[in-house]
Image (cartoon, rainbow, N blue to C red):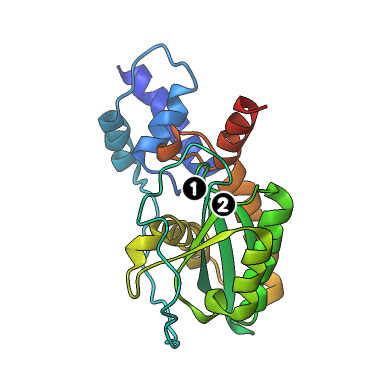
Amino acid sequence: MKQENRQLRQEITRIDHEQDGVYGAPKIREELAKLALPFKVSEKRVQRIMKNLGLRSVVIKKYRPYKKDAVYNGGENLLKRDFSTTKRNEKWVSDITYLHTVEDGWTYLASIMDLATNKIIGWSYSKTMDKSCVLSALHQAVTTQRPKKGVILHSDRGSQYTSHQYREKLVKLGIRQSFSTKGCPYDNAPIESFHAILKKELVYRTVFKSYEDAKPQLFQYIEGRYNRNRIHSALGYKTPQQMEDLLSASVA
């Protein structure tokens, strides 16, 4: 037992270091399972060893500035909190979040997620929170995913998503626009969750000097860590990219 615990301490410390201290016991236990150790490892055992080592996943909450806009009352909530899907490019969700920099003040990240894979398929980082930011994220998503007509794209009722130019662009692309109920973040929970993870694992642990300083770090986190390295319990402990590859192969 002592030898087992010694080995576990070494492996848990290694995994924690590789994942920059953001994995909790469930994900570390899944990483340990991949090693095919000659003994069973329960989640409680991992929790106990992590506690003894003084390791815990990062949990930080920060204030989010909020700007009130006139609320757009048109459109429907097509998702109605049904985030389940096993098909790529069937249901997308989108949102904008705030990131602070020392020199440039508040900056803005617009993201689009495919609910079948949890992958961030389109994103745009900007110094201004306007429709060009969300249009750029949309362009990336459409260019990389090449969806068929009929995909649902859900968002809140912010002015960027309800602008005439944005709505007309979606109509031209054959994308069905869906809106959250006024003042109800639960209607857009998956993308809200992604932004919370981004802030917990990167933003609140980093001082961004400027917009130019933050941009490559966001790219590295979203495209490198989140999409291709970070496992998700909801995906059976696969990464978003692994899930996308799996679903792509199943329809090939």
Element type at mark 1:
loop
Q: Along the line of sight, which residue is nearer the eye, 13 or 184?
A: 184
Query: Which residue reaches farthest top?
Result: 38
Q: x, y percentage for residue 42?
A: 30, 25
| Amino acid, disc 2 | Val
Q: x, y percentage for residue 172?
A: 68, 64
Q: Quadrant of the C terminus?
A: top right
Element type at mark 2:
loop
| Residue sitting at x 29%, y 39% | 52
| Residue sitting at x 74%, y 54% | 143
Q: x, y percentage for residue 111?
A: 57, 62
Vertical placement of 55 versus 126: above or below? above
The disc at residue 151 is 2
- Tell me the residue that label 1 is attached to: 115
Left or right: where 107 falls relative to 4:
right
| Amino acid, disc 1 | Leu
Question: Earlier along the polypeptide chain: callout 1 or callout 2?
Answer: 1
Q: Quadrant of residue 65?
A: bottom left
